[in-house]
Amino acid sequence: MMTMPFHSARRARALRSAALPALAAALFTPAVARADAAAPPAADADTANDVVVSGQRLSTARALEDKRASDRVIDVISADDLGKLPDATVADSLARIPGVSTIVNQDTGEGEYVTVRGLSGTYNAVMINGVRVANTDPSTRDVSLTVLPPYGLASVTVTKTLTPDQDGDAIGGTIDFRTPSAFDFKNPTTFRLYGSGGFNDRAKSAKLPAENYTVQGDFAHRFADDRFGVFASANYGVTHGDGQETENDGEWEPNQWRANSTEVIDQRNMHLPGIDLDFRRVKNTRYGGNLSLDWRGDTTQLYLRGQVSRQEQRGSNDVTDYRSRKTARLTQVNQNDTGLAQPENSVIGTTTIGGVTYSRYGYSTSQIVDADGDGIITGHDANSSQYWSLNGRSGVWDPKAFQFARNFGTINSNQTLATVSGGGHSDFDRLHVDYQGSYSYGVRENPDNYSIAYNCDKCAPALLSQGLDWVSADPRFPQASPTGAAANVQYDPTLLPFDGASHSRDKQTDNRINAKLDVRYDFDGWLEYLKAGAQFNRSRRVYNYTPLWSGDFTGTALDGKSLAASGLIQRDVPDILHGEYYYGAIFDPAKVRAAINAAQALGNNGLPSATDLLSNDNRNTEKVTAGYLLAHLKQGAVQATIGVRAEHRETKNIFWSDDGDNSGFDSTTNSYTVVLPSANLIWRPTDKQVYHLALWTGYSPPEYGYLSGGQSVARNAQNEITAISRGNPNLKAARAVNLDVSAEYYPDRTSIVSIAGYYKSISNFIFTNGSQVNADTSVGTVEISQPQNGKDAIVYGFEAAIVKQFQGLPAPFDGFGFEGNVTIQHSEGDTGQAYRMGRKIPLINTPGVLYNASLTYQKYGFEAKLSYNYRGKYIESLRDNAVDKWVQHNRSVDLHTRYNINDRFAIDVDVSNLLDDWKYWTTKGDNPSYLKDYMEPGRNVIVRASARF
């Protein structure tokens, strides 16, 4: 949604004191809220030649003002910039600033999480109006940003270097979303109305609901002699989409048999067991609003601010599944023997056992395990399910069976994020006091998950007695090549019997309260002020998973019926992914829900036990008490902020312990204190130059899932414990020492050239969710599997950015401008996994290259912005045999156009994903030949209208 930028009374005073009358006069629309209380920039030297700026140039100027004046290294996105491009979420908008990349939602292709300078969202702090927001994900500290649309905000500030008055658990940085107040506007009363409509071309071509629309209204009013202000905003929007995806079904496997998931394998020759074709129908509804009440007295300012955002995602995911199946194989006595002949070359006859005829082989019982003990080796001795010809080093890739399935699952989730904060600022001569109390509530729930499967695994043997081969001219689109009777299975749903169905729900909530007090005392001379503060934060998270039913359709109208006869088919989809695949039957969501509800109502199969209802539930309470002291020094053009912060964190986890008759809830506790010194230096030799040097420390507590994972206890026949799998409450927090340097040059108020470098040295970095510890006990050695701290990690990188408006050139070239930035970064760390033998790998979610380039134009009331965003490849997760899951590079070309009819009315026409590119492409290893997931969401076309009164 397009919005106008906002202007704060504080900035107005700063501009007047800085003698920028030309710019101040241009502020006929509201401006961005300032990111932090920083000294105002000095006036430009050549004010006689000032050019009054407006529109998108004005929003650029305001963001650059904030960056230039800040005591920290920051980047600011103004409200107008948030509406410049057709971004679905604020995560997509954030990806356009240096050092920030987006992690997309695989279902929708929308940005959901972000990384800052190579560190995932769990290492960053996310705030709204300075309030730390609640988490909604059950296992991570990351904050899903899909719930926040890129409108209804005043600005977004990304802070990349921290000072002691900020939360210390943000190694990457902080992201602060600011909502407007009535004092952000020039006029005492302002009313704004926005509306947009459009469509998703992929959904439209698939004959699905495709419309997208949004409405937003804002109202601001000041009264009581401009001392009291009210701002209120509300928004509602709906988007539809059709995500089409191909993904691997089963991990890529080496040509030669592998013994386990940890040994090193040959990545040069791997085979694909199968693929899934996904056809997603998704509707996103987002609505919310914010309210701000502000009082501006002579010595005291008070505020009460509230915000709520909700996302309701409804849809379905149809999956067409082609896959080779594992079948029974002979097992080598010596599994490391590589010299055995292949079974088909060792047949010496047949043998009938129990009325079944088996091949008889020339292997000896010293070569192959004689499973039935009859002294000869036959097919009856096959005792291991494998893809390979033999269970042992002589085995090679040789699938013998095939399955085909059509599955369905609902996409049914709700997210709510709400914050309310109250506080103020009071001045007592040299003493200044800030105080705030806040509450944040987050919930993420799947109110009803339904799934159903029809699988040819139970088809006639003629359909199963072959493996699958795959051919493809493009590794994103592997093609299955079944032969004979199997070649028709994808077109004939009468061949698909019922395979299973389920119904469940889950819910994660987080209630977070916070109180903080900051006191500042001003001095004369080189010591400008001392500042001290204290803060308390408590987070209480609860996760409940409830399996409601899992079973079959015995006793219902669908009992014993194939997919064709079930009545669950809605229609056939002839093709997906630009005609690369025939898709076939898709399910009717309403009929699937009705069928499962009918089976569940009978209560005669698949009902969960008491343990099933509790085994995945957990609760977590964290309390953080913090205090800090800092000094702000200034001598001429040099200023410094030096100080220290201490944080004490207490954690209590309650989780289910699965131990037979002794099962029940268990608990763990842990606490620790971190001390975080820092020093930030700034040199401003002229009003156009700013240099930063920061040496600071930070930390990041372990993921919730690592701390409070459920416990499982294994016992032997004597009831003695032999193995334990559990979370690890004693995990250490990751600690980081950070060095940042940057240089910024501002040729004029709408331009900047900047470079920055950063280095992060991290200890106790946690890469993996499990490793094994042996504990010697009175009954022997107990294997304890739990998350462990990894070793050290480093991240370093370089950022460069340029923003240049070509004012002063001959018409019409004076309307053009350019914005661009590039980030090149390197990361490495030791996972702590012994089988990697100390080899270091890049950090999770850390691309090596990021860049953005935008061509802008503004003249004659017309504005345009053509933007290109590129994100390099990165590791998404660690996988078996050290062949990890990589996300391949991604690009997006987006177009924004606006015509300002006058200073009150404007029309926008935007197109996202102009080139119809992919949004999510992952592979097994970094080689693009080995597909894991490839997803395309299509284009979105949007028309907006706005009015301001």
Image (cartoon, grey):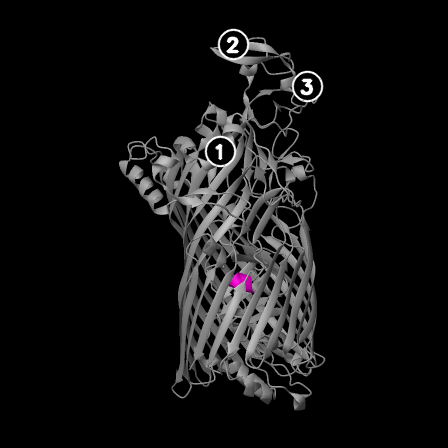
The mark closer to the camera, 1 or 3, is 1
Pointer 1 residue: 488
In the displayed structure, 931 sits above or below 519; it is above
The answer to whether residue 138 is seen in the rendering is yes
In the displayed structure, 451 sits above or below 282; it is above
Instruction: Tell me residue 319's x, y (percent).
Output: 47, 42
Q: Which mark is residue 56?
A: none
User: Are circles 1 and 3 on residues that touch, CB within 8 Å?
Assistant: no
Which amino acid lies under the numbered mark 1 shown in the image of this protein? Asn
Which badge, 3 or 2, comes first in the chain's sequence? Answer: 3
Q: Please tell me whether mark 2 sits on a helix, a strand or a loop.
A: strand
Instruction: Tell me residue 234's x, y (percent).
Output: 39, 70
Rendered residue at 32%/40% (across/down): 595
Rendered residue at 54%/67% (across/down): 85
**Circle 1 residues within 10 Å: few <14, some 14–19, many ≥20:** few
In the rendered structure, the answer to whether residue 734 lies left or right of residue 214 reads right
Instruction: Tell me residue 497's x, y (percent).
Output: 40, 32
In this rendered view, identify the residue nearer to me: 108 or 663: 108
The mark closer to the camera, 2 or 1, is 1
Q: Quadrant of the C terminus?
A: bottom left
Which amino acid lies under the numbered mark 2 shown in the image of this protein? Thr
Give the extent of the magenta segment: 87-93
Q: Which mark is residue 352?
A: 2
Instruction: Tell me residue 759's x, y (percent).
Output: 69, 59
Mark 3 → mark 2, Cα distance in angstroms: 25 Å
Which badge, 1 or 3, comes first in the chain's sequence? Answer: 3
Q: Please tell me whether mark 3 sits on a helix, a strand or a loop.
A: loop
Mark 1 → mark 3, Cα distance in angstroms: 37 Å
Quadrant hosting residue 416: bottom left
Instruction: Identify the residue at the far bottom of this view.
Output: 48
